[in-house]
Image (spheres, helix red, strand yellow):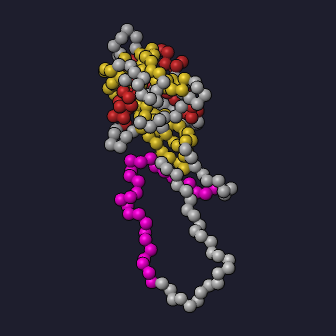
Amino acid sequence: MARTPGDDERSRRTGGSRAAAGGRAAPGGNGASNGNGASKSNGAPKSNGAPKSNGASKSNRASKSAPRLDTPAPARNGRRRLTRVEETSAGGLVVDLQGPRRRAALIGRLDRRGRLLWSLPKGHVEAGETNEDAAIREVEEETGIRGRVLAPLGTVDFWFVAEDRRIHKTVHHFLLEARGGELSDADVEVTEVAWVPLEELRDRLAYDGERRLVDAAEQLLADSA
């Protein structure tokens, strides 16, 4: 399961809530330079040797499920530009509707400064998965809670830099109802997991985009009551 950004999420968020996120490609070399001392030979006839190879076959190209890469052009100052990568993730707000108080499961991760930041569970959409399937899987992997999708909440997108790549991540969020499981922080990428009353979510969540998703979730729950 791929990591999601922690404090890198402080980068510009462009999507907000829409209520009801590759490898290096270096520029080609210029080839070996001609020697300055060797004279040109005019006597040897032109070679009719083997035809030039057209490179790897189409079967060796990256599959469509891989993150989309934009190969960087060399910068004028000699520094290599970062490769742009598009990534898609899914997750959501899983809510326990059976107890006396409605509550949701959040995950806590330590950022590079050692701060514990609370957020919604989420992760990469795997090949062959729908966004809904990925959200259910990621929520269970990161919180231990099995959920059922009730409705889409919206998307959050942001930029961050990792391993010489400039990554644009789009995260599809859903409202889920808890149907089983037990709260657990067994996932190695998660520091803590907690049930948090709905009215306290805005104060606990670290990111504005996810706070706006809570507003959408509360409206959906009020409409379905």
Quarter of the image containing the N terminus? Answer: top left
Q: Nearer the viewer, residue 56 or 34?
A: 34
Magenta segment includes 65: yes
Taken as a whole, is the magenta stretch helix, strand or loop? loop
Say if 42 sits above or below 192 in the image. below
Q: Is residue 9 left or right of residue 60?
A: right
Quadrant in which residue 74 is drawn: bottom right
Say if 28 sits above or below 137 in the image. below
Quadrant in which residue 110 is drawn: top right
For this orientation, the residue located farthest to the front is 37
Quarter of the image containing the C terminus? Answer: top left
Say if 36 sits above or below 162 in the image. below
Q: Nearer the viewer, residue 74 or 11?
A: 74
Q: Nearer the viewer, residue 23 or 195?
A: 23
Give the magenta part as a residue range: 48-75
Residue 183: percent from left, percent from top: 38, 19
**Residue at the spot 34% in from the left edge and 28% down from the top edge:** 149
**Residue at the spot 36% in from the left edge and 35% down from the top edge:** 134
Q: Is residue 208 left or right of residue 145?
A: right
**Residue at the spot 57% in from the left edge and 34% down from the top edge:** 8
For this orientation, the residue located farthest to the top is 100
Q: How many marks?
A: 0
**Residue at the spot 33% in from the left edge and 24% down from the top edge:** 146
Residue 3: percent from left, percent from top: 47, 35
Residue 20: percent from left, percent from top: 41, 29
Residue 30: percent from left, percent from top: 59, 67
Quadrant in which residue 182 is drawn: top left
